[in-house]
Amino acid sequence: MTRFAEPILHVDMDSFFVEVERLDHPELKGRPVAVGGTGRRGVIASASYEARSFGVRSAMPVGAAMRRCPDLVVVNNSHGRYGAVSAEIFEIMRSFTPLVEGISIDEAFLDVSGLRLHYTSPREVGAGIRAAIKEQVGIPSSVGIASTKFVAKVASKHAKPDGMLLIIAGTELDFLHPLDVGELWGVGEVTEKSLSDLGIRTIGDLADTPAALLEHRVGRAAARHLGALAWAQDPRPVEGGTPTRSISSEGTFSVDLSDPDTIERETLRMCDQVAARLAKARVAGHTVTLKVRFSDFTTISRSSRRPEPIASTHEIWETARGLIERASIDGRSIRLLGVALSDLVDVEGTRQMVLGHERIDAAADAVDGVRDRFGAGAVIPARVAPRPRDSGSGGRNGA
């Protein structure tokens, strides 16, 4: 059998955070639902398609979303199910092919060219993957199939929700050229406005634009990149291996933080939430990232990579505390904090005993055991436990 002419799949979960919440709360099915912060400064992280029909979108303030959809149910993303469900989905995809390139917690590229002796077509592979995810995990997914990564990703977008779209080799331009130019990778609002000033509104318009004119408007590198995509040229292979993903916790505060002790307590709280999610997903990670957004909306991040994978609250906090110092906050008011652990690996067989950490490791194992039995909130660091003076203070939204 000859190789598949369209060997690239882009698998994308539909409203991933919402669908994970519906696994635990079936009563939310069929209703307009959004995941995000529930307070005054909360924002939408994910919206169901029922909510999107009212104009609710990611990154929209919760207040604006509620005005558009008064019946909207907003769920606070405060637990660690997302990472665990993501790990299940990636394992299903790897059961079909080892060439899985994760590009976020809920989407990946797959190269299925090696399956041509087992399946009659890439469409059959895509259908099998979607069925397996639905049966084993219980959430819907959409799949785009094409000869290149770019076209496959655009195809999966147009297959949503809960669908599959194959772009037959040789018909890529028929599919791409009528689409809005904003669907090209690298075209944001500013670039789209600049292209619109030239009368470029579709991908076909851009493909027909003289290279010199395009370079003058957006620069040589961007012009070459966009021109290649407009002609469906994308030679990048699927990079197999561990998916690029992270487990994180972040919060937007209803009252800006400036007190150093409060900032450290909130950071420690997030480190503990990340540790609970890592334990549930049975993964550890190398790179700790601290995200800080100040009251003027300036956002910075600081990262540090540990030589050995870490997973406990103590280890994550040990690194995050140093990142707070590197962030040079210096009394500035903070609107948002976030902690993430990336470069994830499976727990089994990865941890090496660090001399002097035997008690720390034993304590972390004990905490994981209690949380497995009684829930992630059963054990928290003493420093972040509620204090009498906390009552009446500003709340925290999102996680």
Image: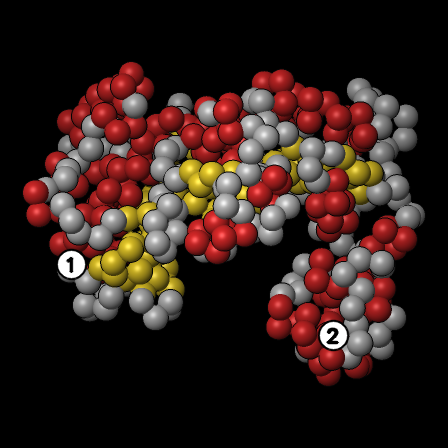
Distance in Å between CA atoms under marks 2 and 1: 47 Å
Number of residue marks: 2
State the quadrant of the C terminus: top left
Front one among 34 and 368: 34
Q: Quadrant of residue 91?
A: top right
State the quadrant of the N terminus: top right
Residue 69, disc: none
Q: Is residue 198 visible?
A: yes
Q: Say left or right for 280 vs 334.
A: right
Front one among 287 and 371: 371
Q: Quadrant of residue 139?
A: top right
Which residue, as the protein is rendered here, is positioned at the far left?
A: 388
> At x 63% / y 29%, what residue is drawn?
140
Is 206 above or below relative to 169?
below
Tag 2: residue type? Ser
The reply to whether callout 2 and callout 1 are in contact (CB within 8 Å) is no
Around disc 1, counting alpha carbons within 10 Å, would you say few (fewer than 14), some (14 to 19), or many (20 or more)?
few
Task: Say what secondary structure mark 2 lies in.
Answer: helix
Mark 1 — residue?
260
Around disc 2, counting alpha carbons within 10 Å, would you say few (fewer than 14), some (14 to 19), or many (20 or more)?
few
> At x 90% / y 53%, what residue is drawn?
174
Mark 2 — residue?
196
Q: Nearer the viewer, mark 2 or mark 1?
A: 2
Residue 343 at what x, y percent from top left?
44, 42
> At x 73% / y 23%, what residue is drawn?
128
Residue 367 at what x, y percent from top left?
23, 24
Task: Say what secondary structure mark 1 lies in.
Answer: helix
Specify the color scheme: secondary structure
Is 216 above or below relative to 306?
below
Q: Is residue 89 visible?
A: no
